[in-house]
Image (tube, rainbow, N blue to C red):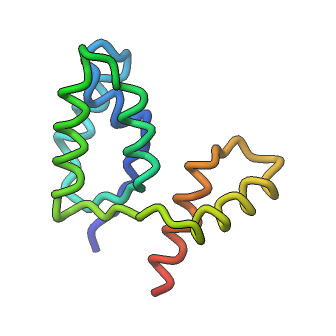
Amino acid sequence: MRQTVFLDTSYLIALIRKKDARHPDALAAASIFTGRFVTTDLVLVELANSLSLPPNRAAVISAIERIRTDAATTIISFTSEGMERALTLFKSSHDKSWGLVDCFFFCGYERKTDT
C-alpha cells in the first residue's frame, strides 16, 4: 500500500521559496516520495496568502495550479459543515498547538477515510 502524505503550508512554502532555510530539505523530500498527497483548500489559501508578494506570486500560482490538477493529490474542499466541525475541535483542543486549518484537515480527512 502506498503512503499518503499531508501537504501542509510550511512544507509547500519551503518547496517554493528558494530562500527558505528548509528549501533543500523540501526538495530532497519531494524528489524521493512517490506516494499520494492530501491537502485542503485552506492550506492552498494560506499558501497563496503567505507568498502573495510579487517576487513569489507567479511561483505560488503555478504551484497551486499543479496541486489542483495532480491526479496523485486529494484536496479536501472547504465547506460550512467542515468549518463547524473544525471549530468545535479547535475549541476543545486546549492542550494542543493545532491551528484552525490543522483542525479542518483532521476533521475532513477523518470523514474522507470513513466513506
Count the numbered circles shown. 0
Tell me where residue 25 sits by quadrant: top left
Q: Single out the residue that lies furthest toward the bottom.
A: 115
Q: Position of residue 106 (x, y in %)?
A: 57, 62
Q: Position of residue 10 (x, y in %)?
A: 43, 33
| Towards the viewer: 32 or 36 | 36
Q: Position of residue 31 (x, y in %)?
A: 17, 40
| Towards the viewer: 47 or 93 | 47
Q: Residue shown at 72%/54% (left/top)?
A: 90
Q: Single out the residue that lies furthest toward the front.
A: 80
Q: Is residue 105 left or right of residue 67?
A: right
Q: Is residue 115 left or right of residue 14?
A: right
The quadrant in which the N terminus is found is: bottom left
Tell me where residue 23 sits by quadrant: top left
The quadrant in which the C terminus is found is: bottom left
Q: Residue shown at 34%/61% (left/top)?
A: 75
Q: Residue shown at 27%/39% (left/top)?
A: 29
Tell me where residue 59 sits by quadrant: top left
Q: Is residue 47 left or right of residue 69?
A: right
Above or below, 13 against 79 in this view is: above
Q: Is residue 27 left or right of residue 75?
A: left
Q: Position of residue 82 (x, y in %)?
A: 57, 67
